[in-house]
Amino acid sequence: MDGSPARGQGKAGIAQLNQISDPKIFQSEFERLIRADLQHIEIFVALWDTGLRILHVPAWLRSGLERHPALAVKLQQGEMVGISHEENSAARPAAAARSSVVLIPLINDGRLQAAVGLVSPPDGPHLSAEDIEAVRQNAHDAAPILARLQEIESLQRQNQEFTRKADRAASAEANVAKLADEKNRFEALVKIGWYVQSNIAHDLRTPLGAIRGYARMILDGRTGDINDKQREYLRIITENTNRVISTANWMSHIAELSGQQVGLGVFDLREVWTESARAAQGLLSGKALTLTQRIPEESFEITADPEKLTYVFKELLAVAVKLSPSGSTITVEFSHSRQREVTVKVTARGAGMASETLSGIFDPPPSTTGVTQAGKEAQINLSGVYDVIGMYGGRMFVKSAAGQDATFLFTLPAITVGGEDKSHEQTFNFGRR
């Protein structure tokens, strides 16, 4: 039997199957290999579906296997089985001449990989025992090859699934990072809003408290007798003042500011100052001014818009240069308060301002420029600077008098994106002064 034509051709064909890299191609080539020696019968190779635990056989044969589940068990155990082509026929031994279908399993490591189906026509020649043995031997030799291909295919599917999962995980991670960033920025906006609200409420309460206090003193008779009509008017003033003071506790300026209006970024304020000072060298040189910097070697991290803070430094330096006598000194100091809020002070030596200039320095002017081209002291205006500082929950002060130094000071709360405030809760004064 070893020298039979089918046997010899099978060995050569099996060697060629080793060059195949796809189970589907293996299936067709293995069918072709067997059909070359058994041209008088129908042949098919049915692959075993591990997930569904079924053989992908023709529909007419699948119904027979479903009626006789013991046949599938025998195939998985490595036994050849026979089944009649007639729908109601019982299973018969594989070697029986009357069997119209013979299923020969491909087993590797005790696992069913596929089955070769040999279908004999009812009125044609039947399979011989030698034919069946030759196919069985080919199936035995081809089983490890198919097992290797199916293992490779399984690994490829797993790799594709891992890749899809990795892509989904990366996408989910990116979405989580984006959401976290948006959450952090929203929290920072909420914190800034708290500072702004506190500042506005304070600025309303302070003068209203004074109005209410003086009205009460008049009502108490500390300034002399008052008539009934005056008393009624003062009572109305007091009641309405109380109402506005209560309303001030609930005001929120931040609700009027959109995300586009309030740009946010975490940065070291020293870096913005360095660029601003470099840009102002031309102004300083024009009047032979000396710029003295007192900035500690520590972080001055804030949450704000660096472009808006660049504008603040530009305007403050422009005003300081305008006011300073030629050859004098401008001093810039950075510091942290006990609550860790950032404080910046710009002092122009000998650059005092008259009281009428100081009183309107934060009032909105017709022009938004800090120093007008006319260059008159009365036209100096820092309303834009004041609005930027206030937008981020800060405070702005100007102190000066005729013949003295002019000092410009602002503070910014130490808010960090995604972290806790570095300053303690407190009410800041947002007043124009």
Image: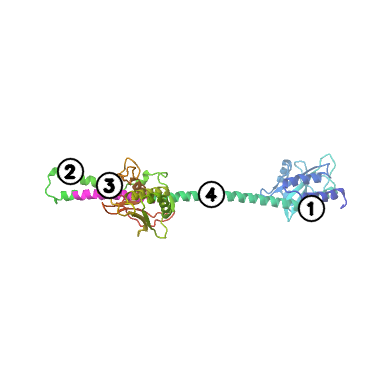
Label 2 Cα neighbours within 10 Å, binned few <14 / some 14-19 / many ≥20: few
Mark 2 / mark 1, whichever is N-terminal: 1
**Residue type highlighted by circle 1:** Asp
x%, y% of residue 357? 27, 47
Question: Which label's residue is closer to the chain start, 3 or 2?
Answer: 2
Q: CA distance from mark 1 to mark 4?
A: 47 Å
Earlier in the chain: of badge 3 and badge 1, it is 1
Nearer the camera: disc 3 or disc 1 = 3
Which residue corresponds to mark 2? 233
- The residue at the point 23 percent across, 46 percent down is 241
Disc 2 residue type (three-letter): Tyr
| Mark toward the viewer: 3 or 2 | 3
| Pick the front one: 91 or 58 | 58
State which quadrant residue 89 falls in. top right
For marks 3 and 2, give the CA distance. Answer: 36 Å
Identify the residue position indicated by label 3 in the image.
Answer: 357
Residue 209 belongs to magenta span? yes
Front residue of 387/365: it is 365
Secondary element under disc 1, as helix, strand or loop, is: helix
First along the sequence among labels 2 and 4: 4
